[in-house]
Amino acid sequence: MSPNRTVDSYYGASAHPVLTRPSLAGTADCDVCVVGGGIAGCSVALHLAERGYRVVLLEEQCIGWGASGRSGGQAIVGVAAGQAKIERLVGMAAARAIWDVSVAGLTLINELTIKHAINCDWVSGQMQVALKPRHERELQEELANLHNRYNYTSASYLNRADVAALIATNRYTGALYDSASGHLHPLNYTLGLAAAAAGRGVKIFENTRALAYETGCPIRVRTVNGQVYCRYLALCGNTYLMEFAPPLAKKIMAVATHIIATERLGAKRAHSLIANNAAVSDMNWVLDYFRLSADHRMLFGGRVSYSALASFGSARSTRSRMLKVFPQLTGSRIEHAWGGYVDITMNRAPHFGRLAPDVYFLQGFSGHGVALAGIAGALLAAAIAGTAERFDVFARIPHRNFPGGPMLRRPALIMAMLYYRLRDLL
């Protein structure tokens, strides 16, 4: 056993020891090759192995190295686009099916952590908080929609006084509280999924970059020092696939986000900041999100960058945002600071589908991947096994390429995002 070889973050520092996994050298044969060792890829591998498939998983770095092991750890019901947009894109019946899958994603976390004894510090409760009257109206409309059209009763509205009693700040004017959503240690959760998959026979190769694949019978996946022959291929690398799958890269954009972790505050002080220990995210486009860790630190994230040029080495800006919410943390030391990329789509809806009859993909979680990626992996596994109904509902969501081509699409996105940053001020 050895410490996890991931990015320098609070999660990396507090990760459970893991087995050192080899890189692929030579040839491997399997039923399904999975590319990507995050929550989605590990879930695909685990669920396929439980169905009796022979699975090889390839990870360019180490398990949980990408967004799955760096995120804010908030497991939230629904999808980033919101149900109103999903209804417009695919109709009410399909939108309801997508919603039900997202709810099942939260249930699946509970089932997997119990079944496989994954210690990942799960805490129930998540709050989406308003900063202005417009946000309050939007939350109340969303709550009415969830109750009346989706029969979802886990959510409730909190007024300003209710929020002030739970979060020690005067910044928020209302909130939507969901008792079914929650938060966890995302890296330990991902490592637990990988360990469960390996325990059921999945061959996991780390430090193994997938270079290209050739369709056929079988499919051939080339790596730096080897190759994998398989019947099916599952692409779960999100923004890290790049030239491995150019058609997918056109549909997503890497957006940088940053997180800091304070020193240990002690149980009493920590819970004086968030009395119900819920995860919190605000409603601004450039949002803040935060929660308490199991060892009573404040984990605070935000400062989204669309330029992909921002350094992850400085915590100054993120700390400044934290102090606007919790000025009482002015004297608290920042012990960890890190960043990573979220894969967003143009419409913020998840992007699942096939590049060929035997080549499947999952991407575009747009910040909602903690819960959705796990259930998406189960859906992909079911689709390979011949039950594709729920997977194909997601595949019906239309997606456009980011405009501008390789050279201009990021500048075009930056200009578009200026509108939303200005809207946060209104």
Image (spheres, rainbow, N blue to C red):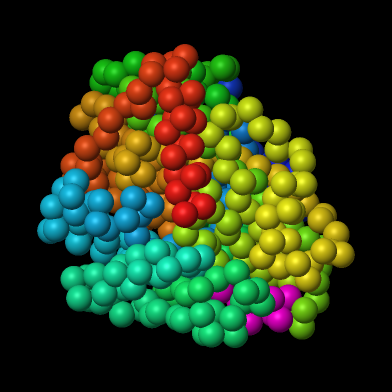
| Residue 37 shows in this picture | no
Depicted 419 relative to depicted 359: above or below? below
Q: Nearer the viewer, residue 330 or 238?
A: 330
User: Residue 156: image x %, image y %?
Assistant: 38, 80
Residue 417: x %, y % from top left: 46, 37
Quarter of the image where one finds residue 146: bottom left
- 219 relative to 64, above or below: above
Q: Is residue 333 left or right of residue 206?
A: right
- Magenta part of the protein: which range? 270-279
- The answer to whether residue 184 shows anywhere in this view is yes
Between 351 and 382, the one nearer to me in the picture: 351
Judge by depth and name the residue closer to the eye, 280 or 381.
280
Could you tell me which residue is drawn at 18 percent across and 42 percent down?
A: 396
| Displayed quadrant of residue 87 | bottom left
Vertical comparison of 66 with 18: above or below: above
Magenta stretch encompasses residue 271: yes
Q: Is residue 365 magenta?
A: no
Q: Picture coordinates of residue 34 (x, y %)? A: 42, 36
